[in-house]
């Protein structure tokens, strides 16, 4: 029976992006990815074939981050700005300014909202996948996502678009 290690290698950029969203620090994110991969490989016998390997690894990463935060009392607002553009094409000046605005706004979200926004909005996971990774109900994912998106709109100057009628 073939081992899933090649699938893990393909997931490393996504793991790094999620780790940077969780830690807001490139060095801490790299450590978190390394810990996640080590834990995942050592516990590979617990992964069930046919299930989503990505979600399984994201769950491991989330749990490691929660444990690290409890142990070290990590505060995202004291960390360096993450590089969200990892693996993407260079952007023009307007896109860079907008990206920095979004990154700054993401860093200001509570960790619970930030994790949901990144999983659903950036990693394009379903509500169910995000709920499973974070070990919360789907309804909680939906409400955190709604609150996180609304807060991002406020922080980036987009305001409340629910009642907007246009120019």
Image (cartoon, grey):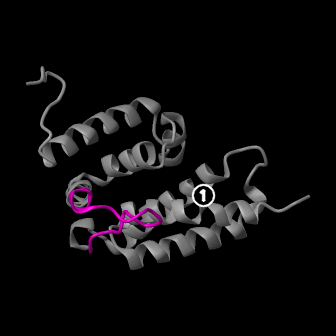
Q: Classify residue 154 by image quadrant.
A: top left
Considering every residue shown, the one lying at the far left of the view is 167
Along the line of sight, which residue is nearer the eye, 83 or 19?
83
Q: Residue at x 79, y 48 (%)?
A: 49
Q: Which span is picked out in magenta?
A: 80-96
Q: Position of residue 21 (x, y in %)?
A: 37, 60
Check the image and report above or below for 49 versus 166: below
92 in magenta: yes
Q: Main secondary structure of the magenta part?
A: loop
Packing grade of label 1 (10 A; few <14, some 14-19, many >=20) is many
Name the residue furthest front. 92
> Which picture quadrant has residue 65?
bottom left
Residue 79: x and y in percent read: 26, 73
Q: In the image, 11: left or right of 62? A: right
Image vertical order of residue 34 relative to residue 61, above or below: below
Mark 1: secondary structure: helix
- Counting from the top left corner in percent of width and height, residue 37 is at 62, 69
Please report the residue visible at 32 percent of the width from the left and 32 percent of the height from the top.
Answer: 143
Query: Along the horizontal axis of the image, is 135 left or right of 107?
Result: right
Q: For residue 32: magenta?
A: no
The quadrant of the image that shows the C terminus is top left
């Amino acid at each position: 029976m073939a081992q899933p290690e090649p699938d893990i290698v393909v997931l490393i950029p996504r793991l790094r992006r999620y780790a940077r969203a969780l830690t807001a620090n490139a060095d801490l994110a790299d450590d978190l990815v390394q810990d996640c991969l080590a834990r995942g490989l050592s516990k590979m016998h617990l992964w069930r074939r046919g299930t989503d390997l990505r979600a399984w690894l994201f769950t491991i990463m989330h749990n490691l981050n929660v444990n690290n935060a409890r142990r070290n009392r990590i505060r995202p607002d004291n960390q360096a700005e993450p590089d969200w553009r990892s693996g993407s094409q260079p952007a023009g000046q307007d896109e860079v300014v907008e990206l920095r605005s979004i990154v700054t706004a993401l860093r200001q979200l509570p960790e619970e909202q930030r994790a949901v926004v990144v999983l659903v909005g950036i990693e394009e996971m379903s509500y169910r996948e995000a709920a499973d990774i974070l070990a919360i109900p789907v309804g909680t994912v939906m409400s955190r996502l709604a609150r996180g998106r609304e807060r991002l709109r406020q922080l980036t100057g987009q305001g409340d678009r629910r009642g907007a009628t246009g120019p």
